[in-house]
Amino acid sequence: AKSLVFRSGKNEPLLIIMSGDNRVDEQKVHNILGEHVFRADADFVKASSGFSIGGVPPVGHRQTPRILLDQDLLYLDVVWAAAGTANAVFQMTPDQLLELTKGSYQDIAERVPDQ
């Protein structure tokens, strides 16, 4: 799983935890939250989470973010997530991720039509 920090229209952090191969569909996130979201720059990520891009974990952030979880993570037996640095990870189940983050599983992945 990749933990991606976004910035809400209210300049608040939003943590989106995605399955590794998936990309965030920002329009779907907008529809769920009812506000625009923007990709955060490295300074915003560090200031709001306390972690650098590439090592952002799903928990332990300096400022508590709203959290959305990619529903495709539910298809996995084990989820691996960053543990605060670019070279440290830990494992859990999708249910443990939900319990740990208090987020919600949502359909937030970009879907490419079959060609």
Image (tube, helix red, strand yellow):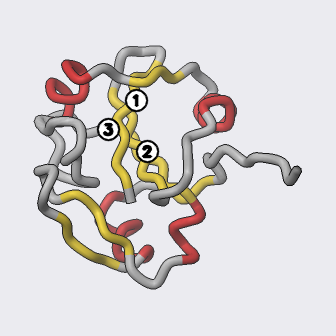
* Residue 83 x/y as whole percent: 16, 59
Please name the amino acid that badge 2 sits on. Answer: Ile
Seen as rendered, the residue at the extreme bottom is 77
Mark 1 touching mark 2, by CB under 8 A? yes
Which residue shows up at 43% across the image and 74% down it? 94
Left or right for 73, reference 97: right
Q: Which residue is mark 3?
A: 65
Question: Residue shown at 20%/71% (left/top)?
Answer: 90
Q: Which picture quadrant has residue 102?
A: bottom left
Residue that appears at 59% across and 64% down: 72
Nearer-N-terminus badge (3/2): 2
Residue picked out by circle 1: 6
Question: Residue 48, position in %: x, y?
Answer: 20, 28
Q: Secondary structure at mark 3?
A: loop
Residue 61 quadrant: top left
Residues at marks 3 and 1, CA–CA distance in whole angstroms: 9 Å
- Mark 1 and mark 2 lie on one chain; the one further toward the N terminus is 1
